[in-house]
Amino acid sequence: MEFAQTLLNWFRENGRDLPWRQTHDPYAIWLSEIILQQTQVKQGWDYWERFMDHWPTVEDLAAATEDEVLREWQGLGYYSRARNLHFAAKQIVALGHFPDTLEEIKRLKGVGDYTAAAIGSIAFGLPAAVVDGNVYRVLARHFGIDTPINTTEGKKVFTALAQSLLPALNREGQGAGLYNQAIMDFGAIQCTPQSPRCSVCPLMESCIALREDRVGVLPVKQKTLKIRERHLIYIYVRCQGYVAIHRRGPGDIWQGLWEPWLVDSPADVPCAAVLQCQNVKHVLTHRILLADFYLWETAERPVLPSDYIWIKETELDDYAKPRLVERLMGFI
């Protein structure tokens, strides 16, 4: 277990001091893991503290409305995470305790293998290895593995290897959880995607990628979906202190969020509407959005599709909106 011990030694000196590491409260740990899915620690930290301040217990979170949760989540993106978080909080309350086995943890909405392993190992000491982007990179480079990480075979290979490297519990009752945090931090700080610190790496003598000059090509990832572009045209309709908005429907990446009037083409834009900004770029995982934004001030409410509602403009901040819409409104 020399590999694991080296990482643990490195972690003691270099590990990040994060607030959710100062507790074994499974709620706080679960919350951090959900927020940090698809989100960098620097950005997620503020959101974690905000959620903990608003809802210090899982019962508090379960009692909140979905709108309240989405509003606090605003700006983080991938809003299905917020909806799943809220649903899972209700699952936990209904269960009567936070689930403490991998099987039970995986039943929570929005929790997959990685998140279950992180929560289970850190909060409950379960012997489960995490496998995320940082772990893939560290293992692929150190052991010289060129199996693509985004294939079924690759996932099996890396999951088995990661599990085999887990240390046993130490005298303080720490084992898998501490090691999982160590290898994730090692990938985030030491064995980074670009410009890894190989010259001062404690694993440099045993690293196959360094010895074979393959650090820059590992891990291997197969090319997948092609990035697509979509053009959006929004019209901010203002009428005597009120504005028109509608809520995105089920099955949408922005499900449950609110937005101004969205039209299909430039021909649908009223002549009186004034262009505020054009081709504002917003990048998602597999899509690039380009948005035009118009302001239409009118003395009479126009006829809009039936799912639009009129609200006081002063109350607009009470409605959770996609980050793109927030940006566009800054041009008014």
Image (tube, grey):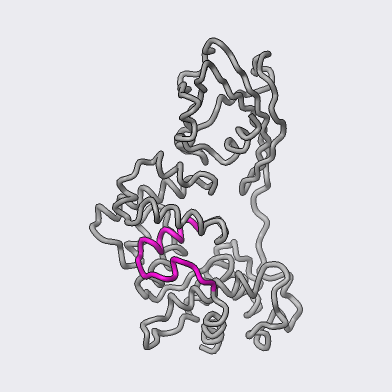
Q: Give percent across and percent down for residue 113.
A: 44, 63
Query: In the picture, which quadrant includes the C terminus?
Result: top right
Q: Nearer the viewer, residue 95 or 21?
A: 21
Q: Which residue of the protein is positioned furthest toward the top in this rendering? A: 300
Q: Quadrant of residue 262?
A: top right
- Lateral position of residue 271 relative to residue 238, left or right: right
In terms of image quadrants, where is residue 273? top right
Q: Is 78 within the magenta?
A: no
The answer to which quarter of the image holds residue 123 is: bottom left
**61 relative to 189 in the view: left or right:** left
- Decide: is 112 above or below 80: below
Q: Which residues are magenta?
A: 16-37
Q: Is residue 116 left or right of residue 273?
A: left
Question: Residue 272 or 241: which is nearer the viewer?
Answer: 241
Residue at left offset 33%, top offset 52%: 89
- Which residue: 45% across, 43% down? 70
Q: Residue furthest left?
A: 96
Horizontal and vertical percent for residue 27?
36, 61
Residue 19 painted magenta: yes
Q: Nearer the viewer, residue 176 or 65?
A: 65
Q: Is residue 302 above or below residue 45?
A: above
